[in-house]
Image (spheres, rainbow, N blue to C red):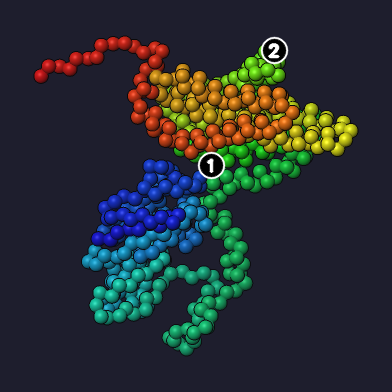
Amino acid sequence: MSTLQVTFNGRIFTFAPGTIVRIGRSSENDIVVKEPTVSRRHARLSFEPSGWVWQNLGQAPTFLAGQPVARFAVGQQVDVYLAAPNGPALLLSAAASYGQGVPQGPGGTELAVGFEAGGGAAASAGRIAGSGGAVAGSGGAVARPTNVAAQPAGDAQADAAAFAGPRPRGYQEYQGQAGSAAAPGSPVSQLDMGSFFEILIPVKSWLHDRGWRQGIRLLIIPYALLPLIFLQVFSSSTSLSSPGWAYSLYVAPLWLLTFWYLIRPPEIGKLEIVIGIGIIIWTIIWLHVVTIYINDHFANPHNILGSLVVGYNEEITKALPVLIAAILVLRIRKQKLDPRTWFLMGTVAGLTFGVVEQAIYTPGALVQINHAHVISEADVGALSFAFRVFVDGFQHAVWAGVSGFFVGIAVNYRRRRIPLLLLGISIPAILHALNDYTLTLFSTVWVGLLVQALSLVLFLGYTLSASAIERRVRRNPNFRGESIMMERFSQPEQSPSP
């Protein structure tokens, strides 16, 4: 029997035959690869009569020698790359066993061979003949050996193995004299100009690469063109808020990708996209109809009580659509999403709130720049504009993400639902109020900077421990069962007498 060694990120994992080795982004896997491009359940390794076999499971591909593969036998040493030809790398190593169906070459030499199958076809273990022999794959697919480990079973030495298979266009074996081997230092292939450019600029390979199906890769193209699009669309606009909308809509997706990378929700599918769109629409409408009215009539940022009104008003605006969405998913679809998903949805609500808010404040900053009498006033206006555009959405998203996480915990574990919701909204609301109050009270931003630093540390702390907190809550009986406010009291059932 042979053991399997997997080297990843400087760590070596060893598995005995009979073990199913699972690899992927999810924390449930034996080898966890925390990269967003890797599938949650990317692949598995299992021990078969022919040896260890890799089987791809997820939508993201696996690359071997630069080509996508779906299934292959692991040889003595194999380098595989996940999701992309230059993605996360794993080194697989499995020593061949004697007497376990290992193919033999001439002279009794045992050979352990790992194959890759082109076009995603599965290739079985190949047979290697001696001089002039061929490699045979399964299903009619041509398999190419990725590594060969020779282990002499006796004193006889193996002859040179010749691998038969298709050659690239323009490839010619070097021939000195008929039947002779290439002289030392001689070229082993000659390339025409067509093959030269085909190798260095592989347009055909790019067109057939499954990596183009990854949404993030495709989104880079229109995203890079957005500034020119905004320049054309808003060039004739007479509204001072137009630059704010343009720049904020450009920056917000970058922040969202950052939050997604930090939070690492288990899955983002069609349901989560629909929820995100609903949260965006709700936040925009509620902000204009309710939030602005309450701030204008009941809030006074010059005292702490008025700042608390602003804090709770705006944090409830962002948390409410997340709560409603979580309850609807639970009631209608009978489904509980991971709290990290609601964590991310909270940041979506916060980014939406920040984009709308900065568009309201942008005209004032532009007017200040235009009417400045000294350079310092123009500088302050420009910095204020930059702060609103680049930081406002991020700032609101940090607070709303924390409340979104608590919403997810509260909906999934309803016994302490009300206290969890109050805590989840109060933490960001108080930080929000302190931020507004200190910026109004003090003539310096350094105090507000401390509040922002505390908010960021809190947010990052929850991104690190969200899964651990959820596991502890799940195991604690104080969070499970009926709501503590509506708990039904009943006598425990008596067990039947024997």
Across and down, in percent, residue 487 comes to: 36, 13
When asked about the image quadrant of residue 3, the answer is bottom left
In depth, the one of 464 and 27 nearer the eye is 464
Q: Which mark is residue 290?
A: none
Number of numbered discs on residues: 2
Specify the quadrant that holds the C terminus.
top left
Please give the residue where the numbered disc 1 appears in the rendered image.
261
Characterize the local packing of mark 2: few (<14), some (14-19) or many (20 or more) Cα atoms within 10 angstroms.
Answer: few
Farthest right residue in view: 373
Dot 1 falls on a residue whose secondary structure is: helix
Compared to residue 111, the image places residue 85 above or below, namely above
Q: Extreme bottom residue here?
A: 177
- Looking at the rendering, which quadrant does residue 251 occupy? top right
Q: Quadrant of the N terminus?
A: bottom left
Q: Secondary structure at mark 2?
A: helix
Check if mark 1's residue and mark 2's residue have beta carbons within 8 Å. Answer: no
Residue kind at label 1, given as amino acid type: Tyr
Front one among 307 and 397: 307
- Please indicate whether residue 138 sits to the left or right of residue 380 in the image: left
371 to the left or right of 180:
right
Q: Position of residue 4 (x, y in %)?
A: 33, 58
Which quadrant of the structure image shows residue 252? top right
- The mark that comes first in sequence, 1 or 2, is 1
Give the residue type at disc 2: His
Residue at (59%, 19%) from the top-left corner? 312
Q: Is residue 58 visible?
A: no
Furthest residue in direction left, as rendered: 498
| Residue carrying label 2 | 297
Choose mark 1 or mark 2, whichever is in front. 2
Q: Which of 38/191 is in front?
A: 38
Instruction: Please report the residue visible at 71 percent of the width from the left and 35 percent of the height from the top.
Output: 387
| Image coordinates for residue 430, horizontal then vertical, percent | 58, 23
